[in-house]
Image (cartoon, rainbow, N blue to C red):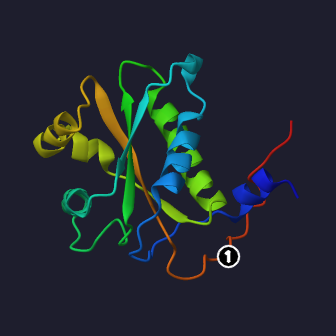
Amino acid sequence: MNAILEALKTRRSCRKFKPDMVPEELLRQIAEAGTYAASGMGKQPCRIVVVRDRHTLDRLSAMNARIMGVPSDPFYGAPVCMVVLADTTRPTYVYDGSLVIGNLMLAAHALGLGSCWIHRAREEFSSPEGQSMLKDWGIEGNYEGIGHCVVGYADGKAPEAAPRKTDFVKFV
C-alpha cells in the first residue's frame, strides 16, 4: 500500500507520552510539513510556534486546563506543543489552520512519533495572558489560536482504529 495512504489509516491520537525530548531536526521536519498544508488561495495565513520550554509548556497546559475545567494535564505529558495560529483577516483561516494541524499529526506519525490535537487555543490566546505570550513571541496582528498539536514519543501502543461507519461515503 502507498505509504501516505497507510499513514492516513494508521495514525492515532496519543494520550500518554514519554518525557524524552524530541530532537530538533525531527521537530523541524514536522513543522515544515505544516507549512505545506493547503490554504485558501495559497495565502498561508498560519503561524506555528514550537514550544519545547518546560515552563512555557506548563503555563499553556495550566491555561488549557482552567478553560476545560479540569485539574489534569490536557497535554498528556507531551514534551512539545506546536501551537497553530491563523490570521483572522483571511476568510478561510480556521480551515487553513485545521489543515496545518492535520499535516503536523501525519508528519509526526511518519517519523515514528505520537501526537494529539488539543483544543481551546482560541480561548487561550484571546485571553490577556495568551495575548502577552504572543507579544513575547513576537507575533503581532489578527492571530487566533486554532489548536495545539502535542508531540512526543508515545508511551504505549497505539489503539486499533474503530470500525468506519458504513454510511460514511456516498457515491452519487
State the residue position of label 1: 160
Q: Quadrant of the C terminus?
A: top right
Number of numbered discs visible in the structure rendering? 1
**Percent x, y of residue 61:** 25, 62
Residue nearer the viewer, 122 or 6: 6
**Percent x, y of residue 97:** 47, 36
**Percent x, y of residue 136:** 17, 38
Residue type at mark 1: give it.
Answer: Glu
Residue nearer the viewer, 23 or 125: 23
Q: Quadrant of residue 167?
A: bottom right
Q: Residues within 10 Å of mark 1 (few under 14, many from 20)?
A: few
Please give left or right for residue 2 compared with residue 167 in the image.
right
Residue found 62% across the figure and 77% down from its top: 159
Please give left or right for residue 1 compared with residue 113 in the image.
right
SS for dot 1: loop
**Percent x, y of residue 117:** 46, 56
Residue, far bottom: 156
Residue found 60% across the figure and 30% down from its top: 38
Residue found 62% across the figure and 61% down from its top: 109
Q: Quadrant of residue 108?
A: bottom right
Residue found 50% across the figure and 44% down from its top: 31
Q: Quadrant of the N terminus?
A: bottom right
- Image height check: is 91 above or below 79? above
